[in-house]
Image: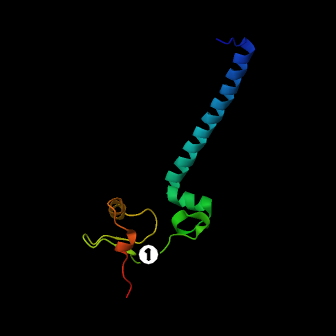
Amino acid sequence: MRRVSLKTIQRRIQVLEVQAEKLSRRNKTLGTIANLMKRHGVSVGELRSALTGGGKGGRGGRGGKRGKVPAMYKNTKTGETWSGRGRPARWITAAEKAGHKRTEFLVKKS
C-alpha cells in the first residue's frame, strides 16, 4: 500500500472543499432560476427555445420541425405505414428479419 503524506491529503481536502462550494452555489442558483420561472409562468421549452435562439420546435439552427411526408412503405396485412424517415418501423424490421426485402413494401405511386 502506498503511503500518502499529510500535506497531500490536506491539498486534496482543499480541492474538494472548493468543488463542494461551487456545487452549493450552483444548486442555489438553479433553485432561484426555477422559482423565477414558476413565478413568471415560463416553461422549460420556452427557456430552451430562448437559449438556442430557435423558433418553433427548439431545434436550433435546423429550421424547426419538418412537415409530414407521404408513406413510402406499407404493410399490406395490417395497413401500417412508414415514411422512410428516422428509425424503421417495428413491423418492417421484423419483416426484414424474417427474410423479406424492404422493396416488397414500397407504396406504388400513381
Residue 9, x across and y down, in percent: 69, 17
Q: Quadrant of the C terminus?
A: bottom left
Residue at left 46%, top 68%?
85
Dot 1 alpha-carbon crowd within 10 angstroms: few under 14, some 14 to 19, many 20 or more: few
Residue drawn where x is 68% and y is 29% of the image:
18
The residue lying furthest to the right in this view is 7
Residue that sits furthest to the bottom in the current view: 110
Amino acid beneath label 1:
Lys
**Quadrant in which residue 97 is drawn:** bottom left
Residue drawn at x 75%, y 15% as measured from the top left: 7
Judged left or right of residue 73, residue 44 is right
In the rendered image, is residue 42 in sight?
A: no
Instruction: Give the x, y percent position of residue 73.
Output: 37, 73
Toward the front, the furthest residue is 99
Q: For mark 1, give the secondary structure.
A: loop
Q: Is residue 51 left or right of residue 8?
A: left
Could you tell me if residue 46 is visible in this image?
Answer: yes
Q: Nearer the viewer, residue 12 or 73?
A: 73
Residue nearest the viewer, comparing 58 with 90? 90
Q: How many marks?
A: 1
Left or right side of 86 for 32? right
Residue, far left: 77
Left or right: residue 100 compared with residue 8: left
Compare residues 43 and 64 and report the one nearer the observer: 64
Q: Compared to 44, does 68 lie above or below?
A: below
Q: How is the model colour-coded?
A: rainbow
* Residue topped by disc 1: 68
For the N terminus, the image quarter is top right
Q: Residue at (61%, 34%) from the top-left corner? A: 24
Q: Position of residue 106 (x, y in %)?
A: 37, 76
* Spot occupied by residue 54 in the image (x, y as percentages of width and height): 59, 66
Write down the quadrant of residue 27 in the picture: top right
